[in-house]
Image: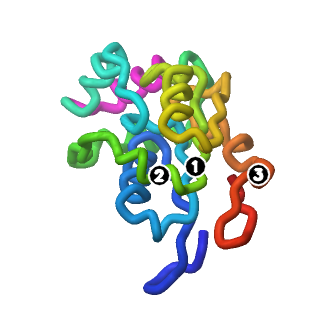
């Protein structure tokens, strides 16, 4: 990231899941402030959620309990061993007052065409079809770098795919005369 504060130059912006939705909206509305975008298994950016996923997830926001959260994450991860500390953090969220996330339309993808964009998709995601999402990315943002990581599930993605996320792909774009990291 670049320096923070007033007058700072554009920054690299990224997010996972709903955070990717927020990052894409911000970048589309303020492209001059964003130097590049890293979207980790973005939801509701290029495609909607699978109906079965939504039905399975509904009990959690309706009445969150540690057991419901644990059950949902075990189902979604398909048996992938989850980090115990991360899992405990997720379960602790059941005790906090519930605030519904703000969602809405997809971001203006045409506004992102001038930005370097890297999209990493969880190959075992149950929230959406990663192949369908990859095709939607290619159609909307032909210059974007998209990769499907076969062994990753949606919720465990940042933990289980950390190496792929951190991997520095060969520079493909130039921004302000310099090679851009994606």
Q: In this view, does 65 lie to the left or right of 89?
A: left
Q: Which of marks 3 and 1 is nearer the N terminus?
A: 1
Which residue does the numbered mark 2 point to in the structure image? 112
Query: Please, what is the dominant secondary structure of the magenta stretch?
Result: helix
Q: Is residue 158 visible?
A: no
- Give the residues in magenta: 63-77
Task: Indicate the position of residue 3 as horizontal and vertical percent values.
Answer: 57, 79
Residue 117, numbered label? 1
- Residue 64 part of the magenta-drawn span: yes
Count of number-bearing discs: 3
Looking at this view, is 143 or 20 the one in front?
A: 143
Looking at this view, is 7 or 64 the one in front?
A: 7
Disc number lying in front (2 or 1) = 2
Looking at this rendering, what residue extends furthest in the bottom direction?
Answer: 7
Is the C-beta separation of discs 2 and 1 under 8 Å?
Answer: yes
Query: Neighbour class for label 3 at 10 Å: few (<14), some, many (≥20)?
Result: few
Query: Neighbour class for label 2 at 10 Å: few (<14), some, many (≥20)?
Result: many
Query: Neighbour class for label 1 at 10 Å: few (<14), some, many (≥20)?
Result: many
In the image, residue 178 above or below residue 29: below
Q: Which residue is drawn at 70% across and 62% down?
A: 174
């Amino acid at each position: 990231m670049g320096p923070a504060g007033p007058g700072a130059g554009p920054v690299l912006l990224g997010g996972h899941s709903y955070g990717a939705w927020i990052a894409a909206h911000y970048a589309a509305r303020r492209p001059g402030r964003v130097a590049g975008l890293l979207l980790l298994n973005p939801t509701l950016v290029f495609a909607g959620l699978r109906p079965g996923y939504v039905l399975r997830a509904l009990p959690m926001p309706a009445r969150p309990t540690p057991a419901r959260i644990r059950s949902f994450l075990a189902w979604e991860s398909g048996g992938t061993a989850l980090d115990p500390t991360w899992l405990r953090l997720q379960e602790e969220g059941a005790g906090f007052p519930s605030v519904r996330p703000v969602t809405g339309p997809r971001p203006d993808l045409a506004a992102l065409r001038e930005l370097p964009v890297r999209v990493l998709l969880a190959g075992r995601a149950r929230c959406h079809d990663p192949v369908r999402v990859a095709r939607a990315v290619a159609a909307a943002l032909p210059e974007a770098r998209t990769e499907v990581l076969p062994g990753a599930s949606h919720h465990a993605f940042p933990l289980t795919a950390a190496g792929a996320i951190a991997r520095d792909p060969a520079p493909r774009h130039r921004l302000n005369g310099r090679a851009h990291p994606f």
